[in-house]
């Protein structure tokens, strides 16, 4: 009975699930086969001979067969009788006539062997036979269903995946996203395009298809994406990268297809892919060298879909990651995620704004000092701040207060910090001081050295991309060639950080380790590769090698021991010489550095212009000839996420 119910209830289900349909069909067919052949087989079975003829006879005929001793063995069941002819060649069967006992008497009289047998009816037999199968299918369906739920998609078939892509029309607005003004400005254009696609299409403007939102967790990437949809009033399709990765190869790709199909149908619309690194991981990176077919197929499908529609289809794909450096380069190519928007951890002012956003719907006491809370929460992301307000409200509620007091917020801040102390590197006052001087040192040298890249931003906000702050040099142009004096300038800038620690703090920290490594590398390659020293003259000591599989190359020495010693000596003395120059510069500009540090303490982020203002006014005050290079090109305020521009030593220290 059970299987009948199943079939009726799940007609749809079977249509969508060829595998199950197949299983059920084969069972039914085998069952029917068994039923047809089975009767004969069971009739013969007892006698162990299948070559016999089966003949249906009347009850009276059966009786006369017995009387004439034409049968040698008789089996009596509940509803029929089987008798084997004495020759053994035929089996006679007949239905029992109820209430007749004469047959048995006749059998006894004629001395014919007889016995009873249990007739199994075909239905119970088949059920018994089917039962284990049904059980297995049932168990399978149960687990599959659970997996389906937990993974948010269909395991049993692709038909189900369509349901998984839900769109919403968020009412989030830009006002809900605070402290990330630069990022908001950058996505403003997308809102405009989604609102008035015709304007752009008519002109023939190329609108970005994909925008990568880069930033630490909780900085508001999802929120910003939603706000874009909310401002433009378009549907928002949201998926997580990891949800594409399924057990079965091909499912993820099918989902990507469905996702795009639906988004295009509902265009203008936004697709948001959170944690895109889950599918977009570079093939060369990580322990995935063996290859992950499913991930790769999904990625390829995503790339194909992105290439598949023109810039006149108003579908914008926003993706979020906190690890842009591990993404497959194919994702970042033009026409794909060719635009990156940094969604930074907020600075002081940003935190004040974010706190205000989240305080809007909470009753705050008059004694609450938002700036004080912002001051205490350097290095925290928007999500942490939202949490702090909520925790404070919960605390106040527990104490049956009518409003949230400053005390509650403090308590909640303390909790948040204690919880985060281990996880993210919240900056402590000692570190803050070191970082402020270190970064100011880099900035001073960058601005006062001819040939150095100029500063676009100095920061002491600890962030995911570079834990302890960074000096972002302005990418003046794409440089393929550097002159000798520019290389030396870069060495000076790199040494500026460590020198500042020595001059202003009197002690050196580990924060400069990578700076020194890079400075050393630069000088080394000037000697070895570029023929820029007297040591080797024009002789190239190290051939440029194509690195195989991106791995580190074993350097092969092709020069004398003496040359090696000379080179070591040259590197060491040059570093020392440059270091002295750098220290002298820092001492010369001591007060300017102090001003920069003070401003950094106050604002956490300072712009290149602010750095230059401080330096120029310092030079004026002291009647110095200006070293600040005011001739460089207009600043293109395009923040590129380029690991080489971010202080790598500090990015590294974030990883532990
Ligand atoms: P991400 O996607 O970067 O990990 P979310 O956008 O999911 O971060 O942020 C989680 C929550 O934290 C948001 O829903 C919001 O309440 C709060 N939040 C994060 N950043 C901001 C911000 N810049 N302004 C206001 N609220 C924020
Ligand atoms: Zn540094």
Image (spheres, helix red, strand yellow):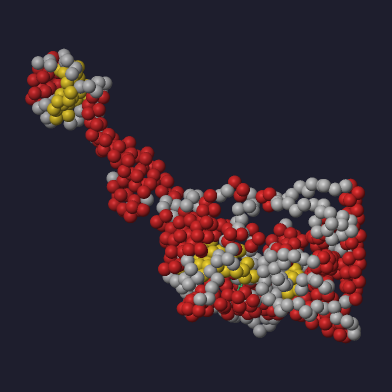
Task: Name the quadrant containing residue 589.
Answer: bottom right
The mark tally for this picture is 0
Residue 139 lies left or right of residue 378; in this view the side is left
Task: Name the quadrant containing residue 597.
Answer: bottom right
Quadrant including the C terminus: bottom right
Q: Position of residue 368 (x, y in %)?
A: 68, 81
Residue 39 lies left or right of residue 289; in this view the side is left
Furthest residue toward front:
538
Q: Residue at x 12, y 16 (%)?
A: 70
Task: Name the quadrant containing residue 362.
Answer: bottom right
Q: Residue at x 17, y 21 (%)?
A: 90
Q: Residue at x 37, y 47 (%)?
A: 20
Q: Position of residue 178 (x, y in %)?
A: 62, 77
Q: Is residue 158 visible?
A: yes
Please name whichever residue, 155 or 337, is drawn nearer the observer in this view of the structure: 337
Q: Position of residue 335 (x, y in %)?
A: 55, 66
Q: Position of residue 528 (x, y in %)?
A: 82, 55
């Amino acid at each position: 009975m059970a299987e009948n119910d199943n079939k009726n209830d799940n007609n749809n289900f079977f249509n969508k699930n060829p595998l199950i349909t197949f299983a059920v069909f084969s069972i039914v067919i085998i069952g029917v086969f068994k039923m047809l052949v089975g009767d004969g087989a069971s009739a013969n079975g007892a006698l162990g001979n299948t070559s016999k003829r089966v003949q249906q006879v009347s009850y009276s005929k059966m009786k006369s067969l017995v009387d004439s001793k034409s049968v040698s063995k008789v089996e009596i069941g509940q509803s029929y009788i089987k008798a084997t002819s004495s020759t053994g060649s035929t089996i006679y069967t007949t239905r029992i006539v109820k209430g007749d006992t004469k047959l048995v008497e006749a059998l006894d009289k004629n001395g014919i062997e007889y016995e009873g047998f249990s007739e199994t009816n075909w239905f119970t037999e088949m059920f018994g036979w089917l039962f284990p199968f049904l059980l297995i299918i049932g168990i399978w369906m149960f687990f599959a269903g659970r997996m389906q739920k937990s993974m948010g998609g269909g395991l049993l078939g692709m038909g189900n995946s369509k349901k998984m892509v839900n769109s919403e029309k968020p009412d989030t607005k830009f006002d809900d996203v605070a402290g990330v003004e630069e990022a908001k400005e950058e996505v403003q254009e997308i809102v405009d395009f989604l609102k008035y696609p015709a304007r752009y299409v008519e002109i023939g403007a190329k609108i970005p298809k994909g925008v990568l939102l880069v930033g630490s967790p909780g900085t508001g990437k999802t929120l910003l994406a939603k706000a874009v949809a909310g401002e433009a009033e378009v549907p928002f399709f949201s998926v997580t990268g990891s949800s594409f990765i399924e057990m079965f190869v091909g499912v993820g790709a099918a989902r990507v297809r469905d996702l795009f199909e639906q988004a295009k149908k509902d265009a203008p619309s936004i697709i948001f892919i959170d944690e895109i690194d889950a599918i977009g991981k570079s093939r060369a990176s990580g322990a995935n060298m063996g290859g992950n077919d499913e991930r790769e197929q999904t990625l390829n499908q995503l790339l194909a879909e992105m290439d598949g529609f023109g810039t006149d289809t108003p579908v914008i794909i926003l993706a979020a990651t906190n690890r842009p450096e591990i993404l497959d380069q194919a994702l970042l190519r033009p026409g794909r995620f060719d635009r990156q928007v940094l969604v930074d951890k907020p600075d002081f002012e940003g935190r004040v704004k974010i706190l205000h956003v989240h305080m809007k719907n909470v009753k705050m006491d008059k004694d609450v000092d938002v700036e004080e809370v912002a001051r205490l929460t350097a290095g925290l992301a928007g999500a942490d701040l939202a949490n702090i307000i909520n925790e404070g409200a919960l605390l106040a509620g527990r104490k049956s207060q009518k409003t949230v007091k400053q005390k509650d917020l403090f308590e909640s801040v303390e909790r948040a910090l204690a919880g985060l102390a281990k996880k993210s590197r919240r900056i402590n006052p000692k570190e803050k001081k070191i970082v402020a001087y270190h970064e100011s040192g880099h900035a001073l040298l960058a601005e006062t050295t001819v040939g150095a890249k100029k500063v676009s931003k100095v920061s002491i906000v600890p962030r995911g991309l570079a834990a302890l702050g960074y000096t972002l040099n302005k990418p003046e142009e794409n440089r393929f060639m550097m002159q000798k004096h520019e290389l030396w300038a870069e060495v000076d800038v790199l040494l500026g950080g460590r020198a500042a620690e020595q001059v202003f703090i009197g002690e050196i920290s580990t924060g400069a380790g990578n700076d020194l490594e890079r400075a050393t590398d630069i000088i080394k390659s000037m000697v070895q590769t570029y023929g820029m020293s007297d040591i080797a003259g024009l002789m190239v000591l190290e051939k440029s090698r194509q690195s195989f599989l991106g791995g580190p190359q074993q350097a092969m020495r092709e020069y004398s021991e003496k040359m090696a010693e000379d080179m070591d000596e040259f590197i060491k003395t040059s570093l020392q010489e440059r270091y002295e120059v750098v220290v002298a510069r820092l001492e010369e500009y001591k007060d300017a550095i102090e001003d920069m540090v003070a401003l950094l303490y106050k604002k956490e982020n300072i712009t290149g212009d602010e750095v230059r203002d401080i330096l120029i006014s310092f030079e004026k005050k002291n009647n110095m000839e200006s070293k600040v290079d005011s001739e460089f090109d207009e600043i293109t305020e395009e923040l590129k996420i380029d690991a080489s521009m971010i202080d790598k030593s500090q990015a590294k220290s974030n990883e532990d």
